[in-house]
Image (cartoon, rainbow, N blue to C red):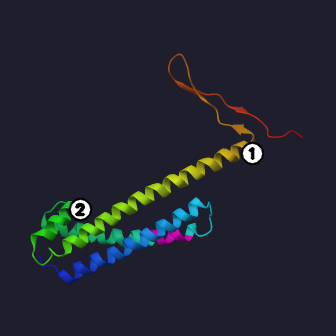
Amino acid sequence: MSLDINALRQMIAQDTTAIAQLKQLLIEERQLLEQRKQDGLQEIIEQKSITVEHLNNSAKLRHQILTTLGLPTNAAGWDTFLQRNTATLPLRDDWKNLVSEFEECQKMNDVNGKMLARSQQTLNHLLNLLRGKVAAPSLYTAQGTQTQHTSSYTVAKA
């Protein structure tokens, strides 16, 4: 199988650009989440989807190349592929940087996801308070099964 080194170099460069864009979007998303601003989140989500789709397409192409060569279809397999040929060896450092940046994006996304989940939990709690519902404590029966006793309280009476 003949590989175009320039095409590989271009793919890694495009992925590096996409990762940088994703990183910036994650920073902007975190800022909006910290400020509890909903305006702009939908646009960021759409841009993230486009960027991730590009990265997925590149991953599929790498998967095809590695499958054709009989190498493991993971990051280590790609690293092995780059080490095999003197022409692709210079791309290895760029690949390692790309993987490192991607892992950082994953961590940032996890933090944003936790912030979003916490905001949703807080909002649900506040809505339940406004509705007059209090979260029921979880209790255990003599058999060890979990039960919840629900009760309702009103915030104000007419």
Question: Where's residue 123, x and y in %?
Answer: 64, 50
In the image, residue 103 above or below residue 40: above
**What residue occupies the far bottom of the structure in this picture?**
6
Q: Quadrant of the N terminus?
A: bottom left
> In this picture, which residue range is highlighted in magenta?
43-49
In the image, residue 145 above or below residue 62: above
Q: Residue at x 21, y 83 (%)?
A: 6
Instruction: Name the residue type under label 2.
Output: Ala
Q: Circle 1 is placed at which residue position? A: 130
Does 57 sit left or right of 85 as displayed? Answer: right
Q: Circle 2 is placed at which residue position? A: 75
Secondary element at tag 1: helix
Q: Nearer the viewer, residue 59 or 80?
A: 80
Q: Nearer the viewer, residue 22 or 48?
A: 22
Q: Residue at x 56, y 68 (%)?
A: 42
In the image, residue 143 above or below residue 45: above
How far separated are the C-alphas under marks 1 and 2?
50 Å
Q: Residue at x 48, y 72 (%)?
A: 47
Residue 8 visible from this viewpoint: yes
Q: Quadrant of the C terminus?
A: top right
Question: Where's residue 104, x and y in %?
Answer: 37, 61
Answer with mark 1 or mark 2, whichever residue precedes in sequence.
2
Does 66 sit left or right of 27 as displayed? Answer: left
Q: Nearer the viewer, residue 76 or 50?
A: 76
Secondary element at tag 2: helix
Magenta span contains residue 68? no
Q: Main secondary structure of the magenta part?
A: helix
Question: Where's residue 106, x and y in %?
Answer: 39, 59
Does 60 sit left or right of 117 as displayed? Answer: left
Residue 45 visible from this viewpoint: no
Corner quadrant of residue 150: top right
Instruction: Name the residue type under label 1.
Output: Leu
